[in-house]
Image (spheres, grey):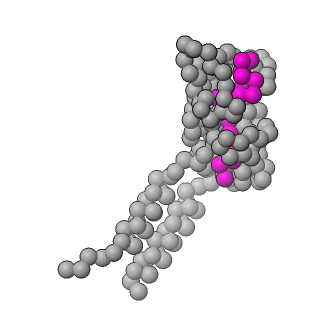
Amino acid sequence: MVRMNTMCAVLAVCGLCGAAGGEIVEFSFPIDVDQEVPTPTIPGPSPVPFGTGVVQLDTGTNMISWTIDYQDLTGPIVTPGAHLHGPADYGATAGVQLFLSDGDPPEPSTGTLVGSASITDTQEADLLAGLWYVNIHTSLNQPGEIRGQVVPEPTSAGFLVFGTVALMLRPKRRH
């Protein structure tokens, strides 16, 4: 009975952590050649292009903001530009959801894309499900040169709750 009461208390704290944790969800992810579909052409001995992305979603307002850092592209970002695409899982492709840059004028081959936009409830659900990805296009790689699946970053509160539950459910040692 004590174990059940403790479990109920932990679950109540979980609910409070979720409510008190605010409505901001952060996504932090790599952007690289390996995720791109189809495989891009990267001439040797050029450095391999790569990047990192951070997207924040305010679930109360459906507002997202992004900071996309990238470097060593084979050329500038040109039309069709850089986008958030979805809904699609790893290895699959989908249509453009949001423009990060339309490539006109071209963006440099190393840089940062920063912006924000409002999204729909359906877009929010797809984003939260990990079904959006960043895709950056160049002249040499029109379908895309680097790509990054937008996935939620685990929260420390989640790990804390998981650890507490795991400790409570472990078998007790008998002396």
Residue at 63 percent of width and 41 percent of height: 149
Rendered location of residue 66, percent (x, y): 65, 36
Rendered location of residue 84, percent (x, y): 72, 37
The residue most toward the bottom is: 1
Is there any visible trace of residue 113 in the rendered image?
no
Residue at 66 percent of width and 53 percent of height: 129
Asked whether 72 or 3 is in front, the reply is: 72
Is there any visible trace of residue 127 in the rendered image?
yes
Left or right position of 7 against 119: left
The answer to which quarter of the image holds residue 139 is top right
Left or right position of 97 against 4: right
Rendered location of residue 65, percent (x, y): 67, 39
The stretch drawn in magenta includes residue 144 = yes
The stretch drawn in magenta includes residue 79 = no
The N terminus sits in image quarter: bottom left
Rendered location of residue 172, percent (x, y): 30, 76
Q: Specify the segment rendered in magenta.
A: 129-146
The answer to which quarter of the image holds residue 2 is bottom left
Left or right position of 51 against 91: left
